[in-house]
Image (tube, coloured by chain):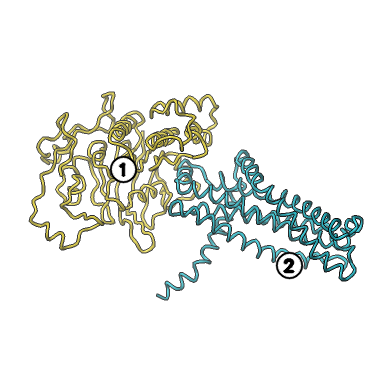
Amino acid sequence: MGVEIRVEDLTKSFGKQLIWGDVSLTIPAGEICVMLGPSGTGKSVFLKTLIGLIKPDRGSIIIEGTDIASCSERELYEIRKLFGVLFQDGAMFGSMNLYDNVAFPLREHTKKSESEVRDIVMEKMDLVGLVGAEDKLPGEISGGMRKRAGLARALVLDPEIVLFDEPDSGLDPVRTSFLNQLIVDLNAQIDATFLIVTHDINTARTVPDNIGLLYHRHLAMFGPREMLLSSEEPVVRQFLNAQRVGPIGMSEEKDADELEAEKGQELPPLPPIPMQLEPSNGIPRRSQREPGAWCRDNGVVPPPGSFQENMSMATGG
Amino acid sequence: MSSLTAARVLAPIGTAGKLFAFALDVLRALFRRPFQLREFLQQGWFIASVTIIPTALVAIPFGAVIALQVGGLIAEFGAQSFTGSASVLAVVQQAAPIGTALLIAGAGGSAIAADLGARKIREELDAMMVLGIDPIQRLVVPRVLACMMVAFFLNGMVSVVGVAGGYVFNVVLQDGTPGAYLASFTALAQLPDIWIGLIKALVFGVIAAIVASYKGMNAAGGPKGVGDAVNESVVITFMLLFVVNFVLSAIYLQVVPPKGG
């Protein structure tokens, strides 16, 4: 049923360079969250900190009562069994074929017989649409297939938390939307907590229940999807709508002169909020909320044209 | 500024400390079950297959050079019948473990560093840790043990091939008598010489494997980082081997007095 991740005052720097500071957020159990941010704001570092591959300088990450930032190595290896992680390039073991790759966690961690392993592996391969490619080596297949194989391996131990490191990088738009649909379907099926790190706006606008935005070495905002998509906050608005006008510049921040020059420019209106992607079988996910529910509860008027079927996916520019 | 200089001066000590800490981690993981027998056998076979032939080819001229040099010198003193003894002493005590170690480091160690380095930059090691498997226990321990085993056996092979090479050169080229060569074996050499040779080979195997694994697992910065890691691991191993060889030889000569002196 998924596990909650509580992050408190997390700070990390490499040498003298602060990556991000005082990040506090709670990733609710069983929901899909997206962590956004311009390139180079430490999104991947954040993800690696959550699984204990990188130790933060300060703060805590609490999962089922264990603080990942300060627990012993033994506890860390124990708690990692709750996780499934999809790495950017799939991170398949190059010396094994796809079948052995997916079976690897089962063979290492369980005492299942080879025929049970086979059943589970084939089920996961079927889930990601890779049946028939079991005997291929990771070097022989495309990046998209490697990603799907990585996903199958991440799911094989029935994780409570699944982390995705840029699932859409290097994939074409069609494959990306298939993968997004797969993520939503998976969440409906296994009810695990999902965290997706990306900078693809389409994914961020349609997939998650919650969105977070890392910017300028801190967490700019974290909250329900509709809250961020209807937000007038300059950074959030600029990023989620892929606009040039706003505080984010080509290299990190714009300087005062550039901001001054933009002052008179009128911001384009917020584009309508799209419908959230639904599971393909039509049965709503447990954590899914009714479209527009947040806006109604908080008295926010969504941009005109929001929550209509078949609306254009294009974001305002 | 002063702190910057201090940091730069102290940096090598930090690296040495990390290497030592890594060695301790390996030692601790050595006793953790389950033991990775398959990986151990595969690695042992792989390291042996890349080192056996070069080692044999290095051992023959090694034995021959010692026979030629020592043989020439010894003939001046009219002690030609001791050539066999000299070459046994030189080959078994020094040449065999060093030659073995250089090939283990150069052929086996570089392959280990390249393999682990490539896994590191492809995030395979991260993936493994996330799957709840300790790469030190899963990958490094079998490699260290495989290196030790192969070094142990190669050392024996180099000893035999080196002494045989010396025999051929002494008897065929320097007109030594076969009987004198063989009979003089025990004149200067003694049994502990073989033990120290084997101990050295084991220690060198450990050093080569640990340095290569450490460098490979800490490769950073893409494919170039892997190349650098391989390069550094071979250079560092060579330097460490010669220092350790000196220390072990000095201790041995103190503990076991040379025979016939």
Where disc 2 sits, the SS reads helix
Above or below, B154 relative to A184: below
Side of B36 where A240 appears, left or right? left
Q: Could you say which is closer to the camera, residue A73 or residue B233?
A: B233
Q: CA distance from mark 2 to mark 1?
A: 62 Å
Q: Residues within 10 Å of mark 2 (few under 14, many from 20)?
A: few
Side of B236 where A194 appears, left or right? left
Mark 1: amino acid: Ile
Which chain comes out cyan in the rendered image?
Answer: B
* Protein chain holding label 1: A
Question: Can you give x and y, in whole percent of width and height, for residue B133 in the image?
Answer: 51, 42
Q: Is residue B149 visible?
A: no
Q: Could you say which is closer to the camera, residue A161 or residue A93?
A: A93
Q: Residue at x 12, y 56 (%)?
A: A262
Above or below, A116 relative to A66: above
Residue B250: mark: 2
* Protein chain holding label 2: B
Question: Can you give x and y, in whole percent of width and height, for residue B257 in the image?
Answer: 82, 66
Mark 2: amino acid: Ala
Q: Nearer the viewer, mark 2 or mark 1?
A: 2
Which residue, given by chain and number where applicable, does mark 1 sit on? A27
Where disc 1 sits, the SS reads strand
Same chain for labels 2 and 1? Say yes or no.
Answer: no
